[in-house]
Image (cartoon, helix red, strand yellow):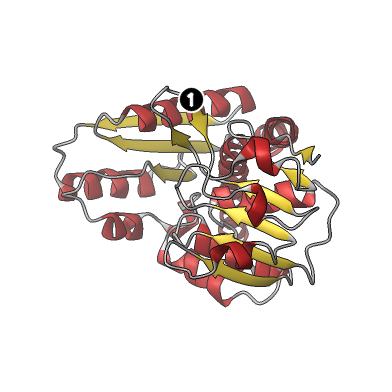
């Protein structure tokens, strides 16, 4: 039976470390990291996520601001809001809560966020730096939060990623593609599979490390798992009875896997923890830039 990877516990440890770092930033440099979350519309899940992020900020000592805009907000008005946040010295990180309403061009909106405040890691500049990084030390300051959390969960098992066969099921720009890039930077041999992959089961069975982010409940079963593999389930699917399940058949797969994340309580808490970490890094980066400007002026 596989060992449970407790994302909630690991995320809490990260948050406790960040709390100390935030206090030190405030005391030594007079800087309080700030995160602004922009929510357009009334998507219930998005509201919950934004509120959870705001609560996590408060508990860590990070200044947080929620900007709630109606679903009918014009794209140019949303852009204007982002421009204001780009200029706001209190705000070190800007989060655009996805998904956006259909009339808004998501790619164009994400491009308007200052790359230095792009704590979600979705700006083309930061994604481009991620793509071009051959080694871990070449990564940009911000990488997408869920993939970063996935790497932390894998490393928490004590497994060395280098040289391992890793399979990522899912090719989204939010999870699949960036987590594949991070695994490559850790020197794994990476296969990216998706909904149109033939022989998906055979490919999954080759994985020492399997990351599933396909958005299909219980897509991966026990027959798809190499005994002893690390299984990271990124999926969150609400079933008709209201129960939250992942993309992995947890009860069956845990009997075969070496390590496995639960849903909920696995990847989800790590996403928020890495968002907070990116926000603190953004604040430190801006403080360093101001110090350089101050010494050269």
Placement of 89 over or under 66, stated as above or below: below
With respect to residue 190, does 56 lie above or below?
above
Q: Is residue 296 visible?
A: no
- Where is 177 relative to 54, above or below? below
| Residue 271 horizontal/vertical position (percent) | 57, 41
Residue 78 visible in the picture: yes
Image position, residue 69 (x, y; %): 24, 33
Q: Could you tell me which residue is drawn at 62 percent across and 74 percent down?
A: 133
Instruction: Tell me which corner region of the image, top left, top right, bottom left or bottom right, holds residue 163.
Output: bottom right
Identify the image quadrant of the C terminus.
bottom right
Q: Which residue is mark 1?
A: 243
Answer above or below: position of 250 versus 58: below
The residue nearer to you, when weighing 217 against 261, is 217
Q: Could you tell me which secondary element the residue under label 1 belongs to?
A: loop
User: In terms of image quadrants, where is residue 143?
Assistant: bottom right
Which image quarter is the N terminus in? top right
């Amino acid at each position: 039976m596989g060992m449970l990877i407790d994302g909630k516990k690991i995320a809490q440890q990260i948050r406790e470390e960040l709390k100390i770092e935030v206090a030190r930033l405030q005391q030594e440099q007079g800087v309080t990291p700030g995160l602004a979350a922009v929510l357009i519309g009334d998507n219930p899940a998005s509201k919950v996520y934004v509120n959870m992020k705001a609560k996590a900020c408060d508990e860590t000592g990070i200044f947080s601001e929620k900007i709630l805009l109606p679903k009918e907000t014009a794209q140019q008005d949303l852009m204007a809001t982002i421009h204001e946040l780009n200029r706001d010295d209190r705000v070190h990180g800007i989060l655009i809560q996805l998904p956006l309403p259909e009339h808004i061009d998501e790619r164009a909106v994400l491009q308007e966020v200052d790359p230095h405040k792009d704590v979600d890691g979705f700006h083309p500049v930061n994604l481009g730096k991620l793509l071009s990084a051959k080694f871990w030390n070449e990564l940009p300051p911000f990488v997408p939060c869920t993939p970063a959390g996935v790497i932390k969960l894998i490393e928490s098992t004590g497994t060395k990623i280098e040289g391992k066969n890793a399979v990522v099921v899912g090719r989204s720009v939010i999870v699949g593609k960036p987590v594949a890039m991070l695994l490559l930077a850790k020197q794994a041999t990476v296969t990216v599979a998706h909904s149109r992959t033939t022989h998906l089961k055979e490919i999954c069975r080759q994985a020492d490390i399997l990351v599933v982010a396909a958005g299909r409940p219980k897509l991966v079963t026990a027959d798809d798992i190499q005994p002893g593999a690390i299984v990271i389930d990124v999926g969150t699917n609400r079933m008709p009875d209201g129960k939250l399940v992942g993309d992995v058949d947890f009860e069956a797969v845990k009997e075969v896997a070496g390590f496995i994340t639960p849903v909920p309580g696995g990847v989800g808490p790590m996403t928020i923890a890495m968002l907070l970490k990116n926000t603190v890094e953004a604040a430190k980066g801006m403080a360093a830039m101001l110090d350089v400007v101050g010494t050269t002026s």
